[in-house]
Structures are given as C-alpha cells and as structure tokens.
Image (tube, rainbow, N blue to C red):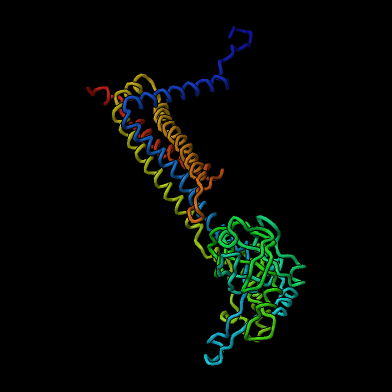
Amino acid sequence: MERGTGTVSPVPTRTRGSAFRIAATAGAEAAGEAVRLLRAHRTRSALTIFGIVWGTASVIFLGGWGQGVAGMVERGLFKTGRNLGEIFAGQIGENFTPAADRRLLWFTLDDLDVMRRRARTPALIAGEFWKVLPVSYRRRAITVDVRGIEPEVATLRGVEVAAGRQISRSDVAERRRVAVLGERVRRRLLGAEGGIGSRIRLDGMSFTVVGLLDKVGTQLHRDRMEIDDQVWLPLTTLQYHWPPDWTDEVVISRILYRVASREQIHEAEVEARAILADRLGTSPTDEEAIRALSSAEALNRLPLAEIKGFMLLLAVALLAIGGVNLLNMMLESVHERRQEIGVRLAVGARRRDVIAQFFLETFLLTIVGGAAGIALGICGCFLLGRFDLPDVIPVPELGVGLVSIAFVVVVGVGVAAGVIPAWRAARIDPAFTLRME
C-alpha cells in the first residue's frame, strides 16, 4: 500500500476453478496411490476386490431372484384369472346342524341372477357348470374336464384364443353344440390333422370345434384340471344334455367373480356369502355350506415380501463380508506404510490430507469392485432370462430400484471400510516412525 494514497494491493484469493483443480489433483494422486497399492499386492488386492465384486453381484442377482419368485408365484396363481374369486355350494356344517341332518346344497340360475343384481363389490360375475366326460376324435379317445360357461367366464379367466373364437352369447342362448379346446386337449385329441371346424364326440354326441385356447401353462391355483386340459361348452348346452340326477333345477356348479383389487377379495366373499346364505337358508358364517376359493386370497397369505427381504438381506451380508476383507487390507496397508505417513506428516502434510488419501483409496477400490459387480449381476440376470425355463423355475427380474439399492450399499461399504484405516493413519506419530529402521 502506498503511503497517503489509501489504496490496498489486492490479496490473492482462491477461485472456484483453482479449488476444482486442487481437488482433481488430489483425486488423481489418490487414484495413482490406489493403483500402486494394487500392483504391490496383486494377489491380496485381487481377492479383496473379488469379494466386493461377488457381494455386489449377489445383491443384484439375489434381489432380482426374490423379485422373480414373487412374480412367478403371482403369475402362476393368476393364470386362472386375476383377482378372481369362486363360490360353490357344499353342505350344512356340523356346528350348525346335527351330523345326520347335514343336507347337500347347490346353486341355481336364480341364485346367479340374484348375485348379479345384489352384489356391489365384484366388478364381473358369471356362472360355470362342469362334468367329466369321454371325448373322441377319429381313433383317439380321452376323458376330459368339460366346463359349461357363459361368455363372461373367458373374460374372468383372461385366456385368449390361439385360433377361432370364444363361446358367444348366441351360443348360450341357442344351446349350440360348439366347443373350445384347451391347448393340451387339442394336442392329445386332434393332433396335427385337426383344428377349427373339426367334429368331436362328447359322450357320443357330436360337437364342432370353434376355438382353440392359447397355452396357459402351469397353474399354482386351480380347481381339479388345468385350463389346458379343459373343454369349454356353452353353459346351457351342458346343462341341457347332462343335467344332474339329484334335482330337476338348472344347477350352477360355481359362481365366479372378479374384484378391482386383491384387497377387496375378502369383502366380496363376505358379501357373496350373505346373499347366497339368505337364498339357501343357511348361516352366512357357515363356511362348509358356502365355500370360497381365491387365488388373490392365497397370494395375500404368502410371505412374498419376507422372501424378497431375506434374499436382499443375504446378498447385503455377502457384500458386507467383502467390505470386511477390504477393511482388513487397508489396515495392513496403513501398518506397512507407517514410515511413509510419518515422513509426510513431518514435512508439513496435514492429518486431514492423510485421512483423505486413505479414505479415497478405499473408496476407489470399492467403486471399481462395485461397478464390476453390478455389471456382472446385470449380465447374469439377463443371460438367465434368455433361457426358456419352465414356469416353476423363477427368473431374476431387474429394476432401476434394485440397481440403485446395490449402488447405495456399495457406497456405504466403501465409506464404512475407509473410515477406520483413515483414522488409524492420521493418528500415527511422525517422531516414532522416523526413529524406525
């Protein structure tokens, strides 16, 4: 400052650009030191990084496997129909009447109509009647599960046709002799030569094949035979030609309904029991008289969330083991480099610089192993998903959330494994290390 002028010479200040360059230089030095550490102890470093790679890949793979198990179970249960409930009649329960007076019950078309008028929870309701009948085509003959259905049943079941059409409303109204075959029935009965328009014989009566169902596959929830093994007829046709021998009424084997979400399935079941119990003269709490089945209820009872959580916890434990190995390696590195650290501190290095050095080394090693592990886990899930596996073997399902969890866990392991070695390095006494040989 010149005397009498009142002006002050500018004091150099650290700009944002210079701070960035200093940080970049420090990061480059830490990366170089990490590379030197890897080269100096190749075998130990490779085994340590392998633990991080394997643990991270396990988070991806086992987490995806848990998702795959949940998805496979849900798809298997809902192959009979998503959020589908079934109500069928049984007999009066022992708690409501003496055993000798337990009468058999059944539903009729009038009961189905009352359900449609009074039920508010179900979004769609339909009736179904079934028989087990012999069916033949040319020289082939098998016994099949025959379902008399309304057109709404196809919608409730969610099964599309591979060829032809579904049972129509006019088929039901006119009691037409038409049939829709499940995929396995088509292969066993028609073979390669049969198809749409083929004439089959059900219990000696001629029917025309008008539709072939798509393959449904293994069902984890079903009533008797799988859909692939069924033959669908118009409801009225089966009722007319094969009526029950215990009553003259037009009988419905079961009433099907669908709700908007699986959380409503219990509410719909209670409502259906109340309506039908009034019709049958039974108690709405008699579960033997009016029985209910539901794939959604079965899914609600399964501990799928616990399974996914256990898989993810197991994977995180494997990654934590890799983190412990990394921690042990860095602690040994601190012990071996005591003289180097002491010299740096003696010539003016700050303890926070030493902390930053070891912390960055640990973190960089973790990131390298974590990136390789994430790539390995994603590739493993992708390759396994390309195999044509049966429905009973789950395939890992990937998602952005799962990859994000793996990344967060890897970062957490890097931070945890870097704190203790960095703290140990900063506590080294320079005077003591300089007296070492």
Residue 243 image offset from top left, x and y in percent: 66, 80
| Quadrant of the rendered image containing residue 219 | bottom right
Q: Quadrant of residue 359?
A: top left
Instruction: Name the quarter where the C terminus is drawn.
Output: top left
Count numbered badges in the picture: 0
**167, above or below 64, in the image:** below
Residue at 38 percent of width and 20 percent of height: 348
Q: Image point 40% across, 32% down: which residue? A: 362
Residue 201 x, y percent position in the rendering: 63, 69
Return the residue nearer the eye: 67 or 312: 67
Residue 123 visible (yes or no): no
- Of residues 259 and 244, the one drawn nearer to the viewer in this rendering: 244
Residue furthest to the front in view is 139
Q: In this view, does 364 lie above or below 108?
A: above
- As displayed, is residue 242 above or below residue 219? below
Q: Position of residue 317 (x, y in %)?
A: 40, 47
